[in-house]
Image (cartoon, grey):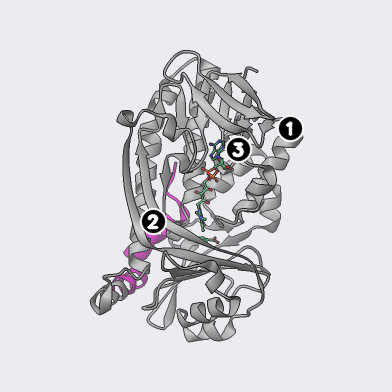
Amino acid sequence: MRTQVAIIGSGPSGLLLGQLLGNAGIDNVILDRVSKDYILGRVRAGVLEEGTVGLLDRCGVGARMHRQGLPHDGFSLAFNGRDHRIDLHGLTGKRVMVYGQTELTHDLMDHREATGGKSIYEAADVTPHDFDRDNPYVTYVQDGITHRIDCDFIIGCDGYHGVSRRSVPQAALKTFERVYPFGWLGLLADVPPVSHELIYANHERGFGLCSMRSETRSRYYIQCALDEKVEDWSDDRFYDELRRRLPEEHAQRMVTGPSFEKSIAPLRSFVAEPMRFGKLFLAGDAAHIVPPTGAKGLNLAASDVHYLFEALAEHYGEGSNAGLDAYSAKALARVWLAVRFSWSMTTMMHRFPDTGEFGQKIQEAELDYLVSSTAASTALAENYVGLPY
Ligand code: RFL
Ligand code: PHB
């Protein structure tokens, strides 16, 4: 088989890029090692920046998001028994959209199928070859047979554990990493959210987050130790712990009900530089990971895809490689701003092993300053709604 662009990974980055390329008449194939249903079973991001919303509209897949998504004009920071609203719209003129990654992925998969895009699921041993030469290709195994796809470019959209980044010679790659000494235990339940906006809570027992997927579905998280087992957390134990970390007014109002998903995610900051090796380009989690506290992971994947699509369109449309040559530096500049923001939100909101009483007071003072200074609130809001690209 031959295509112009072979995309490894059918998560949000791969699907978004595939759709933009397809709409522009650039032939592409998406390969994923797991099935569509498996991908749609993962519960992940929930907050989309305006840039991400715009990109989905540009792809032609925004209709259901605009019908069912929840535009949010603000969120709350809770600490010291009270909560304080950050007026995103008032401070920046922008808002965010609460719409689950699962739904967004569903919309992109449906649209790809409807527009005749080629996707190969359950492809084993996907391997990029010869991306340092003129004629790269990808091989994969299906039903015991090895297949080959010749292409102009290979795009690694295969997440943190994917094969693309690992195929690059170690000496050509510099990585930066911070592993946090805790995780997030998340729960999904069909109960009305405790508040109509998100609440990020700092508490001496640890961080808590009240998010949602709709007006009837809540997504809640609590900071937990890395060695915790999901099986040890009954729904009741989870809700009790979350309530203890919230201001009284919210704790009392919380409606509880049986969960249908519960999982623990570790927290990490990670960046691999550069994001291009000859004819192989990395995008999204394949190149960088941020802790979810800033709600930036999926949104960074979208900005990478924006830069890469523009560069590929310029290559095929005008025969210029300027965009492709600039891709890594351009994407990394925005990546590092989001890495900094996610790290700083994580540091300010979580209980670390050495936080202690002094650290707790410092966090509360920082939060106090953030919510009482318009300059500080604006800086927070500007980062949260997404820096321009
Ligand atoms: P994905 O979604 O991981 O998709 C990668 C795809 O590649 C496939 N793959 C392979 N295919 C072929 N061969 C191989 N060897 C392969 N290895 C892997 C996988 O099967 C998969 O289908 O990466 P992508 O597309 O770059 O998207 C990134 C986002 O998924 C991620 O950044 C976000 O989910 C992060 N994130 C959040 N981001 C936000 O912007 N806002 C949020 O509110 C937010 N909340 C979150 C989050 C991530 C979380 N977890 C669980 C990590 C909350 C959580 C709890
Ligand atoms: C979510 O709804 O899953 C979510 C929202 C905000 C975050 C992280 C996760 O910062």
Q: Main secondary structure of the magenta part?
A: helix
Q: Which residue is the site of mark 1?
A: 115
User: Where residue 5 is drawn, which disc sits there?
Assistant: none
In whole angstroms, how far apart are the C-alphas of marks 3 and 1? 22 Å
277 within the magenta span: no
Give whichever of discs 2 and 1 has the lower sequence position. Answer: 1
Could you tell me which secondary element the residue under label 1 belongs to? loop
Q: Which residue is the site of mark 3?
A: 33
**Which quadrant of the figure has residue 69?**
bottom right
Rendering coords of residue 230 (x, y %): 54, 67
Rendering coords of residue 75 (x, y %): 49, 67
Which residue is at 50% across, 25% downward?
128
Which residue is at 56% across, 55% downward?
44
Q: Is residue 96 above or below residue 4?
A: below
- Density class for disc 1 (Cα within 10 Å; few <14, some 14-19, many ≥20) is few
**Which quadrant of the figure has residue 194?**
bottom right
In whole angstroms, how far apart are the C-alphas of marks 3 and 2? 29 Å
Give whichever of discs 3 and 1 has the lower sequence position. Answer: 3
* Number of marks: 3
State yes or no: discs 3 and 2 in contact (Cβ < 8 Å): no
Q: Which residue is the site of mark 2?
A: 342
Position of 101 with respect to 94 (left or right) is right
Is ligand 1 less than 8 Å from the beta carbon at label 3? yes
Position of 338 with respect to 360 (left or right) is right
State the residue in front, 233 or 209: 233
